[in-house]
Amino acid sequence: MTQTTTQSSQTTRQLLLRFWPYLKKRRKTIALDLFCAALTCLCDLVLPLILRTITNTAIQDAAALTVALIMKLALLYLILRLIDAAAQYYMANMGHIMGVYIETDMRRDAFTHLQRLSHTYYSNTKIGQIMGRITNDLFEVTEFSHHCPEEFFIAALKIVISFAILCTCSVPLTILLFLCVPLMMVVSTVLNLKLRTVFRQQRIQIGELNAQIEDSLLGEQVIKAFCAETQECEKFARGNQQFKDIKTKTYHFMALFQASTRLFDGLMYMVVILGGGLFVVYGAITPGDLVAYVLYVSTLIATIRRIVEFAEQFQRGITGIERFFEIMDTPVEITDTPNALPLQVTQGQIIFQDVSFEYPDDHNSVLRHLSLTIHPGERLALVGPSGGGKTTLCNLIPRFYDVTGGKILIDGQNIRAVTLSSLRSAIGIVQQDVYLFSGTVAENIAYGKPHATRAEIEAAAKQAGAHGFITALKDGYDTYVGERGVKLSGGQKQRISIARIFLKNPPILILDEATSALDNENEIIVGQSLEQLAHGRTTLTIAHRLTTIKNYDRILVLDDTGIAESGSHEELLRQKGIYYRLWNQTLDDLP
């Protein structure tokens, strides 16, 4: 099961406690926001008292109801309304901005954590799901961060004060009225749990849909080449239908939620009409008290309805927070040890001591008790059938994965005892599938050295044999390369990636089938650049075309048993073993 489908076992309380540090950073803004929320309650709570005063005065002593009294009460209400407007402005403005700050902090933390996760995580998790979690899911957090403390505070304030004032009018009627509240809360809680479930399903499915769209758009050339447009449309239609079904279910529960709320509203009003009317008939309360009572009940019901309706937004926010913490709870498998020191590369010797490795997700054993010494400045080639562990061996050096047994030393230093940044800074990797970032040619070359000058960038490009074609581009080094470098050819992308390594200037070099995807002409050009790049560096090359490594210092043949053969090109040919067969196959394949 992938991380995208793992169900969280955290309760709402646990999630809120974990979310609290993000709110705590904005506690001054929250405190002022809640103070403004209290001010907005004044108008709603004072208006019934004003009308109660006017009504009772008119009935009991009409002469006392003067224009001056009415003007004073009207002025008081006007002042309260002005205060209410100012408070509402602050809540709508700074409250939402506070939510944006919290959302930004969470997205930053999620992205930072994602940068530290291992290859295993990305092998098992769809990019569309990850993007959904750090974008769409956190949109809801802005509203949640602002409204959650505010809505509950206003509700608590209004319910407590309304209850106290209603009791001054009629204790029995108030008790009858509040007997409806527990039943209302039970129904709301049940529907809330169902809403949380469907909101989570909705988030997961939209992530799946995003992943599918991304997959189809990135593979559009393959789709067209295989005339698979209909197939892709059908696949998308199935995912889209699933999303429609989930969203339909969501609105079903939302409708039940709103209908139940209105039903309980009607029940509470019925209690007031029936009980209040009888109490007036029997003289238990005055007409003025009943007017105030009805207005307070209206305020109370509006408050309960608001908090119940907020439950939908609450569940959306909780679901976003839950999925955020699922990312944050993913363990970082490759980390610095507590006393890690910077790697000091003096010669570039690499030693594998009894190294074993199996992949953590499927426990597929690849390397078993492998021992190997790579001498300083040596050019070592790795060849052999697929699955022999060539790429795995190279991935262990920069700690893309950690060994499960034995250790790897660079100039006598255990790579697990040095800092990751210093280790990876000492290693340059050129891969078969070059990844260029969306940006300019210069920005891509300078990726390993962000503050490089234009002169340094151009010097690296010249060393890589890329300066000529770059200057021939429309905007030279400022040419936009497109997403994943789509505007450049394979050979051009490869030379830019080599220029990137020249600029980084690492003492250790790993070439992962760097020319196998190129045509013969580009292979020769890029091969010359790689020859220059490898000069004076400890170099490991995973080779597919054996003609590119016949002049290497040493060649290792790896298979599922480990190192099957070792020696120079001539020595391995004389052994007439695996390498001999591979070489002859290569000669047969040549035109």
Image (spheres, rainbow, N blue to C red):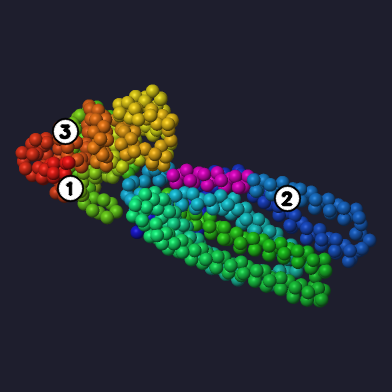
Q: Is residue 538 left or right of residue 285?
A: left
Q: Is residue 145 left or right of residue 521?
A: right
Identify the residue position indicated by label 1 in the image: 385
- The residue at the point 78 percent across, 76 percent down is 278
User: What's under tag 1, amino acid-wise?
Assistant: Pro
User: What's under tag 3, amino acid-wise?
Assistant: Tyr
Q: Label 3 neighbourhood size at 10 Å, few (<14), some (14-19), many (20+)?
A: some
Name the N-terminal-most of marks 1 and 2: 2
Identify the residue position indicated by label 2 in the image: 84
Horizontal and vertical percent for residue 73? 84, 54
User: Magenta stretch containing residue 589, yes or no?
Assistant: no
- The residue at the point 30 percent across, 29 percent down is 464
Q: Nearer the viewer, residue 467 or 386?
A: 467
Looking at the image, which residue sits at the far right?
A: 63
Image quadrant where residue 580 sits: top left
Q: Nearer the viewer, residue 459 or 14?
A: 459
Q: Label 2 neighbourhood size at 10 Å, few (<14), some (14-19), many (20+)?
A: many
Q: Which mark is residue 552?
A: 3
Q: Mark 1 and 3 residues: CB-CB less than 8 Å, in contact? A: no
Q: Nearer the viewer, residue 268 or 112?
A: 112
Given this view, does label 3 or label 2 mark the residue nearer the observer?
3
Horizontal and vertical percent for residue 172? 72, 72
Magenta segment, which residues? 94-111
